[in-house]
Amino acid sequence: MKVILFGASGMVGQGVLRECLLDQNVEGVLAVGRSPVSQQHKKLDELVRSDVTDLAAVEDRLRGYDACFFCLGVSSAGMKEADYRRVTYDLTLAVAQTLARLNPGMTFIYVSGTGTDSTEKGRIMWARVKGETENALRRLPFKAAYMFRPGIIQPLHGIKSKTRIYRILYAVSGPLLTLIRKLRPRWVTTTEQVGRAMIRVGMRGAPRFALENQDINGLAE
């Protein structure tokens, strides 16, 4: 399987990239982003774009892929809905529409979030926008589109969040998250499990389009 990965420099993307490079079923990874990935590997290729929505000039490099793992996103904290929508909906759909045209046999996997509002009518802004994004992705002519809806994600293997407050929280709560993950696996997943589950779904699909923590952890086994 050949994979395109968006958001490889973020916490989730770092974990997904790690698992892709370790997995013998992944032939190659094209990491697309605004900044280069801080590692080199024989299976890793990079495409650095200041504007990842403008892919017209590099479409030839985006053909022939089996799956896209879209891990690019931002926190809604402190953002107005219009600004959040531009990053969450507009950017995602711009990329997905291009990939669907170039790779109609592709499986597209989008990192959403637990609590996403598929009705698009709820009062929680981020959940409503995420729901609209999910619904729009499912209408595109991909082979399949799946929505990962993780709740708490514990970073492993030295992976760190780019957001300072999250780095502090993860550092302080790490032992507690490990305990909760063992006792209540439906509440917590890890960067490793998300990566493994994405590879599994990219290759074999999943029984439902929206996958919560418990589904992700099960698929990772």
Image (cartoon, helix red, strand yellow):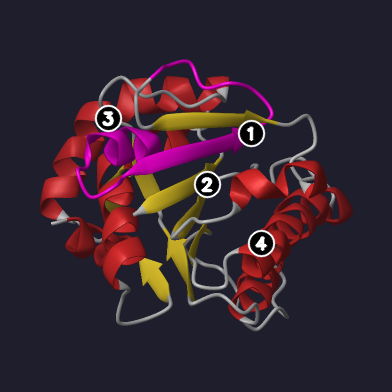
Question: Would residue 133 be found to the left or right of residue 168 on screen?
Answer: right
First of labels 4, 3 by sequence position? 4
Q: Which mark is residue 33?
A: 1
Q: Position of residue 2 (x, y in %)?
A: 40, 50
Q: CA distance from mark 2 to mark 4?
A: 12 Å
Q: Quadrant of residue 16?
A: top left
Q: CA distance from mark 4 to mark 1?
A: 14 Å
Q: Quadrant of residue 209?
A: bottom left
Q: Secondary structure beneath disc 1?
A: strand
Kindly tell me whether residue 105 is visible in this rendering. Answer: yes
First of labels 3, 1 by sequence position? 1
Residue 182 is a magenta residue: no
The residue carrying mark 3 is 156
Q: Residue at x 18, y 37 (%)?
A: 178
Q: Position of residue 212 (x, y in %)?
A: 36, 66
Q: Residue at x 74, y 41 (%)?
A: 52
Q: CA distance from mark 1 to mark 2?
A: 11 Å
Three-letter amino acid code at the position of disc 2: Cys
